[in-house]
Amino acid sequence: MVAELSSAVAVEVARAATLLVSKQRICILTGAGISAESGIPTFRDKQTGLWENYRAEDLATPEAFARDPKLVWSWYQWRRQLVHDKQPNPAHRALAQWQQHCARVNQQLTLITQNVDDLHEQANRLEQTIDKVIHLHGHLWRNRCSHCDKAYEGNTPMSNREVESVEKNADKPSYRFDDSLLQCTHCGSYIRPDIVWFGESLPVDAWQTAEEAAAHCEVFISIGTSSLVYPAAGLAQLAKQNGAKIIEINPDPTANDIVDITLAEKAGIVMPVLIEQIYQHSFP
């Protein structure tokens, strides 16, 4: 893995590892870039197929759902179709391993994500760690009532025809997510994805946890998200104001005065090397 890094990035990775093993409180924020390395399209990617004439910004709003719930629900079912078979990449696996390592050496690591997929949770299961992931923008695989906010307890529905196909071809399942609208069993209103849409507030508990972690950390790391774009910018600035060092991992970093160490490479390449060096420093 080390051979894949340029000499300049390798030097910065070594600096980052030395810094990280000397600190006790670490806060990590991941964004769309880390999931893109697993093949999950970002919001900035052009819509395809039936959705090429729509902008994500025009569909992911409470107003759009109120106006045409079928359209918005169908789009989210299509998004679930796109990502249901995606797997954690080496960066997700390295972060899960790092969470385990921190528990062993009594470091505090808080992992926060702007992503709505479950790739961090998948990686944690693969690495057999139960560490919590803080989701700022919700969960693609959860649903709730659009009116009373009650959680929808059922699974994300697939069509009956495709369920039969899955059962008959278990080695190569072909899921298709049903776009029929669901209704809340408590109030009868339509069920929506448990996602933070444009114009909505971030979940209070998740944001408070993120702010506290950023305010009290000694190192703040942004992975796959610009430290100039909110909420990453707000958390990074909060950390910096309280004396933390800032590390940015991004193949296309932006010039930012608050960043102390820039690792200009894909997270899936950098993270395994960084974790390996952290292990070497911790257990020489």
Image (spheres, grey):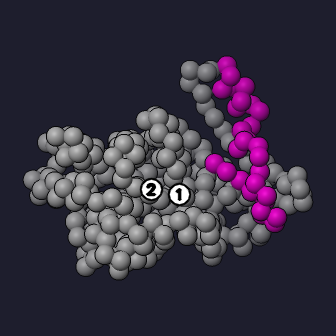
- Three-letter code for the amino acid on which mark 1 is drawn: Ile
Q: Disc 2 designates what residue?
A: 111
Q: Which structural element holds mark 1?
A: strand
Q: Nearer the viewer, residue 147 or 84?
A: 147
**Quarter-wise, where is residue 224 in the image?**
bottom left
Residue 29 rendering spot, x and y as whole percentages: 42, 61
Asked where in the image residue 171 lies, by quadrant, the reply is top right
The image shows residue 173 at horizontal and vertical percentages of 60, 27
- Above or below 129: residue 242: below
Quadrant showing the C terminus: top left
Q: Is residue 274 visible?
A: yes
Quadrant in the picture for residue 218: bottom left
* Amino acid of disc 2: Leu
Q: Quadrant of the N terminus?
A: top left
Residue plotted at (89% across, 56% down): 186
Q: Which residue lies under the disc numbered 1?
A: 134
Decide: marks 2, 1 in contact (CB < 8 A)? yes
Image side of residue 63 versus residue 279, left or right: right
Q: Position of residue 116 (x, y in %)?
A: 55, 55
In the image, 224: left or right of 117?
A: left
Relative to 202, residue 115 above or below: above
Residue 6 pos. (x, y %): 13, 52
Gap between marks 2 and 1 measured at Cα = 6 Å
Local packing at callout 2 (Cα closer than 10 Å; few below 14, some 14-19, many 20+) is many
Question: Magenta residues, as a range?
Answer: 141-168
Residue under the image location 85 percent in, 53 percent down? 183
Magenta segment includes 143: yes
Height in image: 226 above or below 40?
A: below
Q: Considering the numbered disc 2 on the image, is that residue within a helix, a strand or a loop?
A: strand
